[in-house]
Image (cartoon, grey):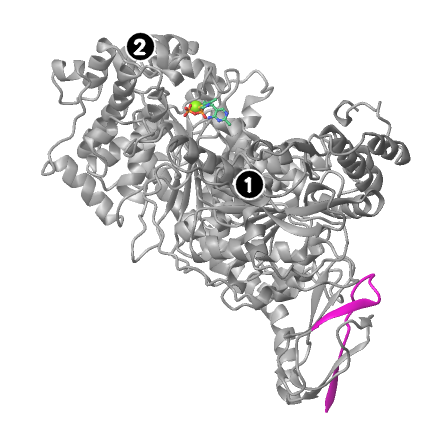
Amino acid sequence: MNQKILVPDIGDFEEVEVIEILVKTGSIIKVNDPVVTIESDKSSVEVPSAIEGTVDSINVKIGDKVSKDDLLVTLIDTRSAEPEAKKIIEEKLPVDTEKIIKAAEKTLVLEKEVSETKTKIKEVKKEKIEVITNSEDIDPTETKEWLESLSAVLDNDGKNRAQFLIKQLIEHSYKEGSDLILSRNTPYINTIKSEEEQRSPGDQNLERKIRSLIRWNAAAMVVRANKKYPELGGHIGTFASAATLYDVGMNHFWRAKNNKFGGDLVYFQGHSAPGMYARAFLEGRITEKELDRFRQEVNPGGLSSYPHPWLMPKFWQFPTVSMGLGPIMSIYQARFTKYLINRGLLKDEGRKIWCFLGDGETDEPESLGAIGLAAREKLDNLIFVVNCNLQRLDGPVRGNGKIIQELEGIFRGAGWNVIKVIWGSYWDSLIAKDKSGLLIKRMNEAVDGEYQAFKAKGGAFVREKFFGKYPELLNLVSQMTDRDIWKLNRGGHDPHKVYAAYHEAMKSTGKPTVILAKTIKGYGMGKTGESINTIHQQKKLDEKDLLYYRDRFDVPLTDAQVKNVEYYKPSDNSPEIKYLKKCRLKLGGNLPERSSFAKPIKTPTADIFSAMKESTGKKEMSTTMVLVRMLTSLLRDKNIAPRLVPIIPDEARTFGMEGFFQKIGIYAHEGQKYEPVDSEQLSSYREDKKGQVLEEGINEAGAMSSWIAAGTSYVNHDISMIPIYIFYSMFGFQRTGDLIWAAGDTQTRGFLIGATAGRTTLAGEGLQHGDGHSHILSSVIPNCKSYDPTFAYELAVIFREGLRRMHDKQENIFYYITTMNENYSHPEIPQDKSVEEGILNGMYLFKEHNKYKKTKIQLLGSGAILREMIYAAEILQKEYQIDSNIWSVTSFNELRKEALEIERYNLLHPDQKPKKTYIEKCLSSTEGPVVAASDYMRINSDQIRSFTTKSFYSFGTDGYGRSDTRKNLRKFFEVDKEHIVAYSLSVLAKEQLLPSKYAKEAIKKYNIDPEKPMPTKL
Ligand SMILES: Cc1ncc(C[n+]2csc(CCOP(=O)(O)OP(=O)(O)O)c2C)c(N)n1
Ligand SMILES: [Mg+2]
């Protein structure tokens, strides 16, 4: 039986053009195979077949206009009806069945949990409840009864039942008119009860010794560097507070990458870098000479101030020192890891992503801005460790409040698993003795400003100010000396507590975990460092401080050695070094360590791009549409297709990319649990567990973090991916420039597409949208290559070269390409062989007007403004008999970079024949002055002014953008064809190549007001 493939529902579009026929008569096609590509004035999309069969006839040809229900192709149906019917039944039945099974399973799990909790709780001996006097409590006896009832429920029916009852009470009270009681906070004590802690299997004695040596060497390297060159800087206090947090991870948890395992990924807090070097020194990975080169990075062998993969590409994996970027990048790293797993590109090995951040750092919007996504995506492969030393650079993070409690509320509210590690083991017995809850009450009361002072001012002070507030608490510590009180440690310095927290975090399922570890900034540094407000920037320790530090951590150095600030490394045969190495060996190798075993991706053949090198004839389209067409073609290349990662921050429809939703699906870790409202349509919103598109929502910082994760997949997952992040060009470099800088540092490989680009080309959007400077901003990133192409073939040449260099040749560069939304027709690529090279170098001769051979001008146009130049050249030729060369400048940035390099070479080789810059090669033998313009600020074209001996005049779109028609905007910014003509005539007059009357006439003719202020002032 014959079956028909009709044009499906294509939304509001009608009469769309067929631009490709993807099947032949007689070919066998399967369900979802693309049949034809159709294109509206905004987007192109493939029409998939809903049935399988053999093509009997093709009922359309390229160029036909089709609407919904028009016949495209007729198939001879080769299927048997039976299996289909069976399939339908299979598809339909399990939904309900599955639900029933799931519900049953849930009940079983719950029952199991309840019974387990019951047994567990019954084992714990019931304590008598004492109620603390509280001024708000008008009836303590009643309070006691309620609490006793709750205890009974806990005892008999477990915590789930207790929580259920509490929830009921709250809801009931709300219904009865009281405010909703909402607390996301637990008391100011450790989340894990001491009796529930998993004990560390490590040798605590040896671990303490190792930690002490790392502490010492980390401080020594900072002190030594600054003794030699006081300008160098460095930090001791941050690592001093975090040493235990890192050591426990290094000794027991973090698995390295090796040939059997992908490795955990650890984002280290930037300012704690000395600690990582100090450990690597003990491991024998860094020499003493290298330690002495801390922050002296200019010559090879120096150690970078902070984690920078660009500077230490075999060591550091993630740049973290710009506060907030580490946390957001790690969240998207964890999400991208799951994406690769769900798409079947990566094995699920239970790898974890750990991110260390400062408590002060959590004030950065980027630190907390994506925690909701982490919970929503159920990133149980993600563990945050917040080093809560209660201080930032200037002083306390929350002097009047409690940062740990604040963060607990925020993270718990977002749906994270929160583990507080506040108190060390010395507190355990005190907390156990505190039957009335008064100690916890006091812990809850004290604010961080006080806690900071407690650690700066000693045991007697703590006795008086902390315990002394209540006589009962003073009593509690009456048997303890001031020294004992001083020794009451904080959780983040207690390896047992830290171990238990990490162990718990590793078990989390369905949720990311945050560990809030309370520490002391400048731990162990004594009166001149510990907990004081100036500790953050302390990089010098005098002899007294050093001797104190040595004694505090029992470092086996003589006084003389301490005075020389010598490093200490035990011999390789010592128990410390053997232990340290054994721990790492057990965990698979070294960390941090950066390596890549990713295979290159073969550059697609040139014919994939050949359609883009042909003229579009009368058909008008934008470069954004060209890009979408090109990506659609690339999705047919078997090497490239699975590796493409389109990333879109809620703008797919703006860019005409909605066709991707159906074709490759939107990544959704839970698949699609609903039938989309537009399910009937061809471009229906399709979410899929294996979806390829990362639809990020309105979140440029998140999208950029995804792009970084995908573009560094070659090093973090040993699989090269090709991320293409498409955004409103104004919300790229301007909005998330710091992340792009970090992307350069991490050697991200991929494409950034600044769509709807240009200050006059994105008409009708206005000041905050009209981008006239992203190419200036992109020019500051050394390994970013940026292009502003005008025509389809230019884009095709640049894109293919990008694929070749980044993904085949594995160069550490990335591409920024602007595409526009202005529709126009595109010519075919000029036949001259040098054109492709010119496009990549930054300019090529597009057209020559040579009729009159009297006066000539060089017109350099870029992006959207090239077409104004082309028109202007025609007017100059026709109306003024002026010849011209029209140069298409695809990248002023690339031209400048090359010229700078040549100029530098020539200056450094004064006795040699000077080399010619590419700009000179193009322009030096041409006649007439240069007029250059782009849709960006004048500084864009000005970049090459000094590299030609010709007179050079730049025009551009300096000033705030605004909304109007393209024509009016180009007139306003003086980059329309009329201004180009008038300015060209004026330039020729100034160069004494033409009488000035022509310019004057043109200014009048085109209604140009010579007294109008500069657009920058309007
Ligand atoms: C974006 C950014 N802003 C400012 C700084 C400068 N800075 C470096 S460390 C620091 C304080 C960090 O405090 P915290 O996060 O609590 O870390 P700690 O050293 O206390 O562990 C500041 C302000 C920076 N590195 N990055
Ligand atoms: Mg801090």
Residue 550's place in the image compared with 622, above or below, is above
Q: Is residue 328 left or right of residue 826?
A: left
Q: Is residue 10 magenta?
A: yes
Q: Is residue 436 magenta?
A: no
- Marks 2 and 1 in Cβ contact (< 8 Å): no
Residue 144 visible here: no
Q: Tag 1: Cα neighbours inside 10 Å, few (<14), some, or many (≥20)?
A: some
Residue 685: quarter of image: bottom right
Q: Secondary structure at mark 1?
A: helix
Task: Tell me the crowding category of disc 2: few under 14, some 14 to 19, or many 20 or more residues within 10 angstroms, Cα based.
Answer: some
If the image is split into quadrants, where does the N terminus sit? bottom right
For residue 799, side relative to residue 88 (left or right): left
Secondary structure at badge 2 equals helix
x, y percent for residue 313: 35, 42
Q: Which mark is residue 920?
A: 1
* Quarter residue 178 falls in: top right
Q: Report the magenta residues as a range.
A: 1-20
Q: Position of residue 169 (x, y in %)?
A: 63, 38
Query: Of the residues under marks 2 and 1, which one precedes in the sequence?
Result: 2
Measuring from the top left, give residue 42's x and y in whole percent. 76, 57
| Quadrant where the image shows the C terminus | top right
Q: Where in the figure is residue 977, as x and y percent of width and height?
A: 80, 42
User: What residue do we see at 17% from left, 34% from top?
Assistant: 206
**In the rendered image, which residue does mark 2 sit on?**
527
| Front residue (pair 766, 300) | 300
Q: What amino acid is labelled 1 in the image?
A: Glu
